[in-house]
Image (spheres, rainbow, N blue to C red):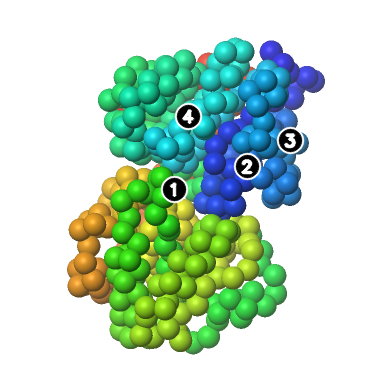
Amino acid sequence: MNKKKDVYRVGITGSYGGLNLGDEAILQSIIEQLRASLPVEITVFSRNPEDTLRRHKVEHALPVRNLAWNEITPEIKKLNLLIFGGGGILFDAEAKTFLREVVIAQEVGVPVMIYAIGTGPLHDPLIQKQVRICFNKAAAITVRERSAAKILEDIGVKQKIYLTSDPAFLLKAEYLPDGTHSHEMLDGNRCLVGMSIREPGAAAPDINEEYYHSLLANAADFMIDRFEANVVFFPMELKTQDIQLSHSVISRMMWAQHASVIIGEYTSGQLLTMVGRLTFAIGMRLHFLIFAALQNVPFIALPYASKVSGLLSTLGIQMPPLHLVNAGRLISYIDTSWDKRHLLQRHIEHAVPEFQRCARETNSIAVQLLKEGRFETSLVAI
């Protein structure tokens, strides 16, 4: 094994360095759990190595999308374990790109752990074949939703698949600079409702942007009028698109003067702290909802994808998929959920510790693979 002075060399590959605070919360939690368990030297295969090094203080970050096969291979050969994940990184449009490091690792004999991933859509037969080959050679497979396990089984993955939870459930709230609450309009006498949206794209190909912008604008106006609230939009992408989409929704609102968008650049942990100021939340992005759960903020979701539906299902929260929700139905659901928000809080408070236990158990599998080359787990095999 490529181990030096009992320091284990771990590579982590996924959707990192893209400045999505949900993905960065995943990476932060994986790193913190590993460092708390073992002496590790971590290499992150990143789309923005400079940001990854600054944000996560890892030993190495490589510009994965800019390096050729023969440039990446020597770096992977140094590893004791390659972690693939977490997050929803396995879908038709980008699975081949994300799997490249897995293919290389398996060719050079480095064990691979599939770490709390989401899957789908996976309809392309060639992509299905590549996933099947790679996953059937994996040292361990963990997924964060039952639907992900079903997809993998349907395409022919024969290895045991263990159900876990998103690593971001282990994220800790972080200190905010003085004046942040005032700067981001998180103070004042009105209650705060947080909202989160996302763009259409390869991972969410069926979103009708015009439709859901109007839907959310109506919902925001209702909450401002009905609950005497201020509505704050939380961009999870640090690029401009989430901010632009939030302003697009606000432009459709009647009570736009009571709506604002988080504008500063924050860590995932700092955004988690800000979510803790909310009275209620409504969102599309999975990790905004996870942040709400961690802060015991009652929420409802607009489930545009199976990963959001999977979270709601595990929490026992009912909500129809986005394409079946109209303005009247959403407003009625918001009104009912608001009235039951304290019951929702108790429900979330009861559920979160099990998510956190499962996330720690995923780390335990990685630690056992590094130390012993095998593992035992209390996670459920599906």
User: In terms of sequence position, does the residue under pointer 4 or pointer 3 come before the other?
Assistant: 3
Count of labels in the image? 4
User: In terms of sequence position, does the residue under pointer 3 or pointer 2 come before the other?
Assistant: 2
Q: Judge by depth and name the residue closer to the eye, 121 or 301.
A: 121
Label 4 sits on what residue type?
Answer: Lys
Q: What is the distance, in whole Å, between disc 1 and disc 4 at their CAs?
A: 35 Å
* 3 vs 2, front mark: 2
User: What kind of element bears circle 4?
Assistant: helix
Q: Judge by depth and name the residue closer to the eye, 24 or 241.
A: 241
Residue 253 appears in the rendering: yes
Label 3 sits on what residue type?
Answer: His
Label 1 sits on what residue type?
Answer: Pro
Disc 4 designates what residue? Answer: 96
User: What kind of element bears circle 2?
Assistant: loop
Q: What is the distance, in whole Å, between disc 1 and disc 3 at their CAs?
A: 32 Å
Label 2 sits on what residue type?
Answer: Arg
Crowd class of label 2 (few under 14; some 14 to 19; many from 20; radius 10 Å): many
Any mark on residue 353, and which? Answer: 1
* 1 vs 3, front mark: 3
Q: Quadrant of residue 62?
A: top right
Any mark on residue 47, and which? Answer: 2
Q: x, y (%) of residue 50?
A: 73, 46
Q: x, y (%) of residue 250?
A: 42, 77
Disc 3 designates what residue? Answer: 60
User: What kind of element bears circle 1?
Assistant: helix
Q: x, y (%) of residue 222?
A: 30, 80
* 4 vs 3, front mark: 4
Do tag 1 and tag 2 residues touch (Cβ < 8 Å)?
Answer: no
Q: Residue at x 31, y 51 (%)?
A: 206
In the rendered image, which quarter contains the N terminus?
top right
In the rendered image, which quarter contains the C terminus?
top left
Q: What is the distance, in whole Å, between disc 3 and disc 2 at their CAs?
A: 13 Å
